[in-house]
Image (tube, rainbow, N blue to C red):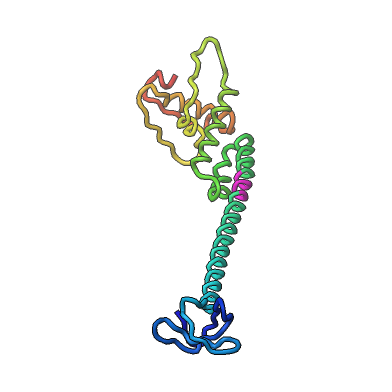
């Protein structure tokens, strides 16, 4: 479509300016030297082409801006993830040191410094793994005594939980008494809790022994 004042180009007459629109698709155009009536189909509307070009350039710029924003957001996310991973590594190193040197303080350190980075499950599993390794290295062995079974993950976490209350519910013969005894052994031998500070109650003689 053409409007008065549009800049156009004709394959024969060259560049011109639309003066008016006639019937049957004819356009009155002022070219460089004269006015001509030409068919609209033989003209290229330079203003429309310019507008289309500008619109296409604007679209491409928006797409590029969106792509740049996406890559910048992705870069920031990766940097944040790397920072979190670096912080997590440092925190786990500190946790591991406390697990070895001052186990009774590790929960307080985690609560004050690590909760936003390390999940409770990750922390509990770390403590549980430490307990299993420590017991494997420190439990007394004797040919005369029955071998103490290795703790599973839930039992190890129960042993490693030294703050608050722990309720252990399991079937008969699953290792509840063993877990209680190993927790006591761990508290005395690794955590420095005095025996007279611990009270154990059992419902039968075998469990007590």
Residue 138 located left or right of residue 175: right
Q: Quadrant of the C terminus?
A: top left
Residue 122: % across, % down: 52, 40
Q: Outermost residue toward the left? A: 171
Residue 143: % across, % down: 54, 10
The quadrant in which residue 7 appears is: bottom right
Q: Main secondary structure of the magenta part?
A: helix
- In the image, residue 52 sits, relative to residue 125, either above or below, namely below
- In the image, residue 87 sits, relative to residue 140, either above or below, namely below
How many numbered marks have been drawn onto this rendered protein structure? 0
Q: Nearer the viewer, residue 89 or 78?
A: 78
- In the image, residue 23 sits, relative to residue 42, either above or below, namely below
Q: Nearer the viewer, residue 82 or 37?
A: 37
Q: Nearer the viewer, residue 75 or 173?
A: 75
Residue at image coords 52%, 33%: 128
Residue at image coords 53%, 89%: 35
Residue 114: % across, % down: 56, 47
Q: Is residue 36 magenta?
A: no
Q: Is residue 85 magenta?
A: yes
Residue 188: % across, % down: 56, 29
Residue at image coords 48%, 82%: 38
**Magenta region:** 82-88
Q: Quadrant of the N terminus?
A: bottom left
């Amino acid at each position: 479509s053409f409007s008065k004042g549009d800049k156009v180009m004709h394959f024969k007459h060259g560049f011109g300016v639309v003066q008016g629109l006639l019937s049957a698709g004819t356009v009155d155009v002022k070219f460089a030297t004269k006015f001509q009536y030409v068919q609209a189909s033989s003209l290229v509307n330079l203003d429309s082409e310019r507008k289309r070009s500008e619109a296409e350039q604007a679209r491409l710029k928006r797409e590029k801006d969106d792509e740049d924003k996406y890559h910048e957001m992705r870069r920031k996310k990766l940097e944040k993830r790397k920072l979190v991973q670096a912080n997590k590594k440092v925190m786990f190193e500190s946790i591991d040191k406390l697990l070895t040197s001052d186990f009774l303080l590790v929960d307080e350190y985690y609560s004050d410094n690590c909760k936003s980075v390390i999940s409770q499950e990750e922390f509990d599993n770390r403590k549980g793994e430490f307990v299993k390794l420590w017991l494997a290295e420190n439990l007394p062995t004797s040919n005369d005594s029955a071998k103490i079974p290795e703790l599973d993950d839930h039992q190890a976490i129960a042993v490693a939980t030294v703050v608050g209350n722990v309720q252990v519910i399991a079937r008969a013969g699953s290792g509840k008494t063993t877990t209680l005894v190993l927790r006591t052994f761990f508290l005395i031998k690794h955590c420095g809790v005095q025996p007279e500070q611990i009270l154990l109650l059992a419902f039968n003689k075998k469990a007590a022994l």
